[in-house]
């Protein structure tokens, strides 16, 4: 595969970059790699919607599938880049497909960290929809929980629980 622009990670920042690229370059080929099976969505909404109507991937989409096709963006859902060669300007997907690019944007965000303490062996983090669904599944079966951290996501999750 060949692309003028390769965007890895389609979160709010990656999506905003896609919008801006299209605003200034209406013809350049774009490949967007999204590591989840869902259309890209607003991650900041998932920990705020455990109560009815609950989690729904479509409800938090940044755009529908027509937006990507209308903007001539090849969206690779459920795909992950496993190697990048900045000299050759290539990226290798888990499927072993190789993408050749002219310009690259890494917009993969951060990963949650959970310290290695025995009491936290069954701890869950909320990074994506699957994480949130696991937490949502435990809500009705638990009398209490421990929220580790005081960031905005922790506070919002505590408010929901």
Image: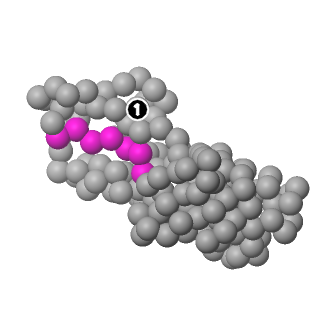
Residues drawn in magenta: 122-128
Quick one: quadrant of the N terminus? bottom right
Quadrant the C terminus occupies: top left
Q: Is residue 62 visible?
A: no
Asked if residue 153 can be seen in this view, the reply is yes
* Front-lying residue, 59 or 127: 127
Query: Callout 1: few (<14), some (14-19), or many (20+) C-alpha neighbours within 10 Å?
Result: some
Q: Residue furthest top?
A: 150
127 in the magenta segment: yes
| Circle 1 SS class | helix
Along the viewing direction, whichever of 5 and 14 lies nearer the viewer: 5
Looking at the picture, how far across and down is residue 37, in whole percent?
Answer: 45, 67
Residue that appears at 49% across and 30% down: 152
Establish if 118 lies above or below 42. above
The residue lying at 25 percent from left, 27 percent from top is 115
Residue sitting nearer the eye, 98 or 110: 98
Disc 1 marks which residue? Answer: 154
Q: In this view, does 142 lie above or below 113?
A: below
Q: Which residue lies furthest to the left in this view?
A: 118
> Does residue 121 appear left or right of residue 7 in this picture?
left
Q: How is the image coloured?
A: one colour
* Magenta segment main secondary structure: loop
- For residue 130, above or below residue 77: above
Total labels: the figure holds: 1
Spot occupied by residue 18 in the image (x, y as percentages of width and height): 72, 56
Name, please, the residue furthest toward the front. 87
């Amino acid at each position: 595969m060949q692309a003028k622009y390769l965007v890895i990670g389609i979160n709010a920042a990656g999506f905003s970059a896609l919008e801006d690229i299209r605003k200034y370059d209406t013809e350049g080929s774009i490949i967007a790699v999204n590591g989840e099976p869902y259309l890209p969505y607003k991650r900041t909404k998932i920990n705020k919607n455990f109560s009815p109507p609950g989690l729904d991937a479509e409800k938090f989409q940044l755009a529908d599938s027509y937006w990507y096709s209308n903007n001539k963006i090849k969206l690779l859902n459920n795909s992950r880049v496993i190697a990048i060669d900045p000299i050759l300007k290539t990226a290798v997907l888990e499927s072993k497909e190789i993408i050749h690019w002219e310009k690259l944007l890494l917009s993969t965000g951060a990963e949650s960290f959970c310290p290695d303490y025995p009491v936290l062996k069954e701890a869950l983090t909320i990074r994506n929809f699957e994480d949130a669904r696991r937490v949502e599944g435990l809500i009705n079966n638990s009398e209490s929980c421990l929220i580790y951290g005081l960031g905005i996501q922790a506070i919002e999750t505590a408010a929901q629980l």
